[in-house]
Amino acid sequence: MCGIAGIAGPICDQNKLDKMGDVLKHRGPDDFKTWIGKEEKIGFSHRRLSIIDPKGGSQPMKTTGNRFVLCYNGEVYNYLELRNELYSKESQMRENWTSSSDVEVLLYMMQQKGIEGLKKLNGMFAFALWDEKENKLFAARDRLGIKPFYYYYDGESFIFASEIKAIIAAGVKPELDNKGVAQYIELQYCLKDRTMFKGIKRLLPGHYLEFDYYSKKLQIHKYWDIPTEPFSDYDEEKYIEEISFLLNDAMRIQLRSDFPIGFHLSGGLDSSTICCLASRLKSESIKTFTGGFKVNNYDESHHAKYLSDHIGAQNFTVFPTSNDLIDSFKHMIYMLDEPVAGAAIFPQYFLSKLISENNVKVALGGQGGDELFCGYVRYLIAVVEDSLKHEVYSNGKKSNSSMNLNELLPNMHYLRGYEPLMKKFFSENLFGDFPQRYYHMMKRTTGLGEILHPDFYKEDDCVMTEFVEEFNNCESNNIIDKMSVFDIKNHLQSLLHLEDRASMAWSVESRIPLLDHRIVETVMRVPAHKRIPAGNLKHLFKRVAQNILPEKILNRTDKKGFPVPISEWFKEDLNYWVKEILLSKKAKERGIYNIPALEKKLNDHVAFDRTIWGLLSLEFWFQNYFD
């Protein structure tokens, strides 16, 4: 795992490359190298976190003859298999290799196979490859977007990096992208390739780009997409076996490392399954890492301790406090570049710190399970509405998304505790256009509209229009398919963004076995009504896990995700601090707040909620990148 950066164009120079590398030091403290091509057309900056072959694999890496130069971040998990494939077809190549790293495998795979080689990769990656002969830059990002790749292109120069702050370090002035800021305010993330910084974009998951140095032409192409055409021969037992095999194989290849590996463990279904499989595959006792809060109803660490004891693992736990939040908030927002995904960054940040302090460089977790296996309650709410709609208007005739209401009854218990979400969802436009209704379900702006100054933010239909357009990009006409695809391509991206930055802040590589693209391709082709039969959330994954997990974990109904007691802290312990930050002279002069409305909100002890987190995040974002 590493930090990559580079410049192709007339502004390329050593000073800029050094600055870009400096701000990415946390991503790769083990090694730092830069490279500048002929006539200073292009340069790469590389920060290395050594995981595979620490003595070899130094970057930027060149092919024999120096035609191709690689700057790469990530892990190609099937590098051993690909190396054997290259060896068997190119016997002379064996003599040219200088390492046993996945870096060299990727370099020669791309040299020999091009785009077809890209499709053979199983891993998480973002890389840039310079062709000295053709004077072209090729860059690609993994299928699910686990590793980041940002770029800035002004028609003359092309600048890229693992993090936005490195692009700013190269001299790109940070400016607000008004649409990106509006999308963040509405959704807590930006849609498609947009960021909150004007002119800085994300290379989308499953895409590659080509930049021609002389013509200055930039082209972007898709090489992979989430399949939704259902299996015609679907048989549950057959595909449960297939998913189980793929999960075991994903674990097998993701356990490859020359350094100690640890495991995120919340005590929930996904992370517990990963830990149980790891304990079977590894001969020695594994280390698990858990975060919690010593606040009523916010601590689930006892479930993690139970699972760790069950598999004979060493469990390490951290309990961040309200004082920790004060000390770390501004730095967390700096590490994020964009304040996405709400308060989840806080426990993840301290969990990664705990992992690093225990001399573990690689950690596996269960991210992605809810999006892939229909684990969110909103999927059930959508099925309930669609089923009710067809009972009322279609004489009981089902759509391809609806189910018999009687079939849903045994799983309605999932809705307990989600009454506010249901009230919000069903209170207006019942049975209306679903993409618009899903947008309103996913909105995170409660209370923000009146607090932000209208000159800074004024709600309009632009965000919803882009949301609906993205939602309808899915070729399937099944609501569950559309929700899952949208969430994987958008909502999940904000969580992966957070996962990457929280772990990299402490130089820890985070791996995600559930997002092995083979698993995604298989699960997403299971007919939607079979992924959530009778509204049973995560049905397929529970079938896979039933012979892996103890019953106490498998049948948990009280999993809460990773909640943070911000409401309690902001009302009590941190009330003075919040006011100190948001009502400071600098904040008031910023012109983004409606000060009377803000003061009223800060004195409202009834609804002191995630709105305050969003306001603090924006304020620290401005302090970090604009002051």
Image (cartoon, rainbow, N blue to C red):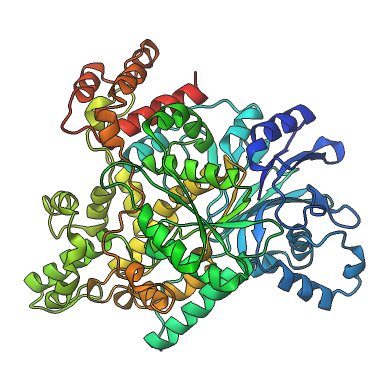
- Position of 534 with respect to 546 (left or right) is left
* Number of numbered markers: 0
For image coordinates 38% across by 77% down, the residue present is: 546
Q: Is residue 259 above or below residue 597?
A: below
- Position of 294 with respect to 278 (left or right) is left
The image quadrant that residue 559 belongs to is bottom left
Image coords of residue 5 (percent x, y): 68, 40
Foreground of the two, 519 or 432: 519
- Position of 464 with respect to 75 (left or right) is left
For image coordinates 72% across by 50% down, the residue present is: 50
Q: In this view, does 35 lie above or below 425?
A: above
Foreground of the two, 182 or 3: 3
The extreme top residue here reads 585
Image coords of residue 207 (percent x, y): 57, 57
Image coords of residue 49 (percent x, y): 69, 47
Q: Can residue 193 be seen in this view?
A: no
- Position of 67 with respect to 202 (left or right) is right
Foreground of the two, 346 or 527: 346
Q: In this view, does 46 lie above or below 122?
A: above
Q: Is residue 537 visible?
A: yes
Q: In this view, does 565 lie above or below 365?
A: above
Image coords of residue 486 (percent x, y): 38, 58
